[in-house]
Image: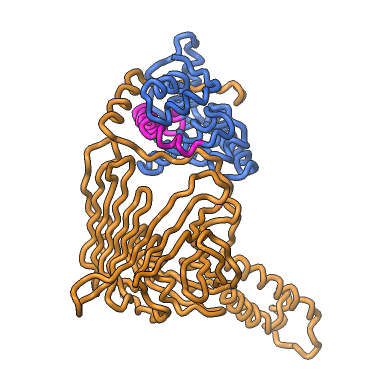
Amino acid sequence: MTATPGVESPDLIARARAGHPEALEAIYVQHGDALMRLAYHLIGSAADAEDVLHDVFLGLPEALGRYQERGTFSAWLRRVTTRVALDRLRATRRRREVPLEGANEPTTSASDRDLADRSELERALGTLPEKLRVVFVLKEIDGQSHMEIAETLGIRVGTSEVRLHRAIRRLRRFLKESP
Amino acid sequence: MTHSQWRFRAPTAPAGLMERVIAARAQGLRTTIPDGAPAVPRPIVRPPFVYAAVAVLVAGGALLRQWPPSPDDGVEITQTLRECGMTTEMPWLMTASALVLATACGQEPTGAVSAAPAAPAVLEGRGLEAGTWVYESGRRDGSSGRRRHTYELARVGDPGETSWQSVSNGAHRADTLWYTADGSRPIRQTVRVARGGKDLWAVDVTYGTTIASVVSDYLGNGKSPPQRRAWSNPITSAGPTFPAVHGPAIVHLVRQLPLAREWSGSVQAGPFGSQNPLRQTSFHVEGEGIVRVPAGVFDCWRVTVANGASRLETLWVSKTEQLLVRALSGSEDAGVEAVLVSFTPQG
């Protein structure tokens, strides 16, 4: 399955809004991987990320009733997923120092050294406070702009930039100090 | 490695999840997920004590202009104060100005609301009146649809034991409130929330001298089986003078407030949406103006509603009928508002 967010036809969105299973399936095929990755990095647990995806697609037809087709559909979908993930994160009051659990699909093409770095990075990411981690994930992993992040989280662009800067500084410090 | 080289592993979207979703939807299960519309940053609202502190500093700065002191001040302690840049009068003036400004800014005394507060006697306004209110609500920036809510208030019960019953039905939520015959106290309140034809949760509160029972029945989130949970914070304290100040309660409450220019008052409200047994909710008439809504054009009081120092919302209440004509929570640009579409008195 590949994540290639593209331009959905109004017809596909209309059918998804009406709850047609094949339209939901098509959206899932197109965006599922990217949304899973986003939810996983925000929450830090594959099982919880799967629950987030489940909730998003279960409520998607009703939520699409509020979608006004301003901006891209994928940006809207990412915002919805981020908000569902953050709601879940806050509800479960997950301890931030718990490291990310192992991903269930390791990349086979990476070198051993690369894999070791990744594991350490994930551990470092798990130590960040929620506010910093969310901005870091949205900017550095999901590739969103500060403007998009600000719109998703209801913060100012400057706040997003400051949080990213702090997140990077903390990650660097953690990686420098870790054995 | 530089941060631009950071790479993170992640699982792919699980196969079979959509089958589960489609099967769940076929059974009528739904979830309510947040809106994907862009959010607007909240305006920076500083608590009143910040303004008070700034004013104190300004006052202090003004007093410093009295330097140097008169030559007859020879007491050692005065000299010490002067070395710090202060005069003997300054602490008094600073304290006084802080108190005045804190009061002017509407700051309330800190500390928890007592378990059995004295009920403020503010419900002396127009009184309750049977009728039907229709409101339309939505975000000011148009990022959400407009929804209609109908509130009906009627007298119920046998002669001699009459009370008031308020029934409201929104798109997803149904509230029923019962008040005493004089309308001054709530007797019972039930709320039921449903999405997509499925009940999500319900709550039933019985009020009295002591809140006798609070039952919360979570009917499931559309995914797991229905759950019944005990109220997280059992309440044993004096009853409120009004139920939670939102929804239909606020519509009926404003009719009972003796609104006038510069009037302020408060009620004990609760226990919905709060871990505290009771909350002190204050009202202040801060202005007036003409408001145009679908129900017509009204000459209104502009009333701010606050919990302590935090402003909750602004209400526009018509001067003659004391109808809640408009409510705004948040900013004029992107806040949520409700406007009166019609009011039909009964009998």
Q: In the depicted view, which residue is nearer to us: B310 or B83?
A: B310
Q: Name the colour assigned to chain A in the rendering.
A: blue
Compared across the picture, whether B346 is left or right of B62 comes to: left
Q: Which quadrant, please, contains the C terminus of chain B? A: bottom left
Task: Verify whether residue A165 appears in magenta.
Answer: no
Say which of B294 and B61 sits in front: B294
Q: Quadrant of the N terminus of chain B?
A: top right
Residue ranking furthest to the front: B347
Residue nearer the viewer, A163 or A152: A152
Task: Give the residue drawn at x 40%, y 55%.
Answer: B149
Q: Is residue B343 above or below residue B137?
A: below
Can you say whether B147 is above or below A174 in the image? below
The chain drawn in orange is: B
Q: Residue furthest top?
A: A109
Q: Is residue A45 shown to the viewer in this render? A: no
Which of the 4 image quadrants contains residue A160? top right
Q: For residue B28, what is the image quadrant? A: top left
Residue A71, x across and y down, in percent: 59, 32
Q: Residue at x 40, y 71 (%)?
A: B253
Q: Determine whether B45 is above or below A158 in the image.
A: below
> From the viewer's perspective, is B333 left or right of A89?
right
- State left or right for residue A111 relative to residue B15: right
Residue A59 lies in the magenta stretch? yes
Position in image of residue B298 (x %, y %): 55, 69
Q: Position of residue A38 (x, y in %)?
A: 47, 28
Which quadrant of the figure has residue B240? bottom left
Look at the image and give the residue range highlighted in magenta: A39-67
Q: Nearer the viewer, residue A18 or B140?
A: A18
